[in-house]
Amino acid sequence: MIEEIIAYFQKSGGDYLSLLWGHIYISLISVAVAMVIAIPLGILVYRSKITSMIAERGFGLLRIVPSLAVLIILIPIMGTGVLPSVTALTILAIPPILINTVQAFRNLPPAMLEAANGMGMSPVQSFFKVKLPLAFPLMFAGIRTAAIEVIASATLASYIGAGGLGDLIFTGLSLLRYSLLIIGGGSVALLSLLTGLLLDSIYKRLTRYQRASK
């Protein structure tokens, strides 16, 4: 088995890097699009319990639908390739980001908001200097969750010709080549782990001010 894995990287190292980059690319685009949709929407609806509940439950219901089912539904509309894959993964990524954004802004400390008003801050100043920094940790947790879920689910993109590490997994299944299964599955697991560590590092850098003030 080990010999087969070594032989694969010796013969197909370039192909592996291409599949790895394709997997990262699809995941990155999906999470980025989800952030562009979910964060402004969460900020827009958090003040109203009714609208926030509709938004959360609406996208939450979409999350219940398996990503593979969404991909199959999108094929007649968008065809195959990257676009339907990114659309399906974006639908998967929106709920955790949206829900965390709504909860982050809904549970801001009233005392901090009153202090900002007492200092004469404008609504824009209060948002960027007080609300957003306070909401950031919970929002970022939603982004982290979405990113890891998308990386794991992006293997399904291989079903409709979008490439990625799923090609290795499904090829291994069809040919009963366990070395390819190990390479593909292990790569997805390792990529998820590294993504979590990277996002944790970014979070610590962006919130250094919180620890410096203690």
Image: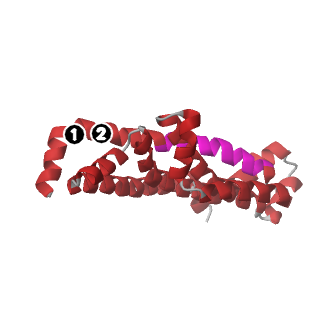
Q: Which mark is residue 32?
A: none
- Amino acid carrying label 2: it is Leu
Image spot of residue 32 (x, y percent): 57, 42
At x 56% / y 51%, what residue is drawn? 206
Please give the name of the residue rendered at 61% of the width and 45% of the height, measured from the top-left corner: 34
* Closest to the observer, 163 or 20: 163
- Which quarter of the figure is the N terminus placed in? bottom left
Secondary structure type for disc 1: helix
Left or right: residue 93 versus residue 52 is left
Q: Which residue is mark 1?
A: 13
Q: Nearer the viewer, residue 121 or 44?
A: 44
Q: Is residue 77 magenta?
A: no
The CA span between labels 1 and 2 is: 6 Å
Measuring from the top left, give residue 55's x and y in whole percent. Answer: 75, 54
Q: Residue at x 28, y 51 (%)?
A: 174
Q: From this viewpoint, is residue 2 visible? A: yes
| Relative to 177, 44 lies left or right | right
As drawn, which residue projects farthest toward the left? 3
Q: Which quadrant is the C terminus positioned in? A: bottom right
Nearest to the observer: residue 61 or residue 2: 61
Above or below 153: residue 9: above
Which residues make up the magenta segment? 27-44
Residue assigned mark 2: 17
The secondary structure type at the circle numbered 2 is: helix
Residue 178 placement (x, y as % from top left): 22, 57
Q: Amino acid at mark 1?
A: Gly
Dot 1 alpha-carbon crowd within 10 angstroms: few under 14, some 14 to 19, many 20 or more: few
Task: Tell me if label 1 and label 2 are in contact, CB under 8 Å.
Answer: yes
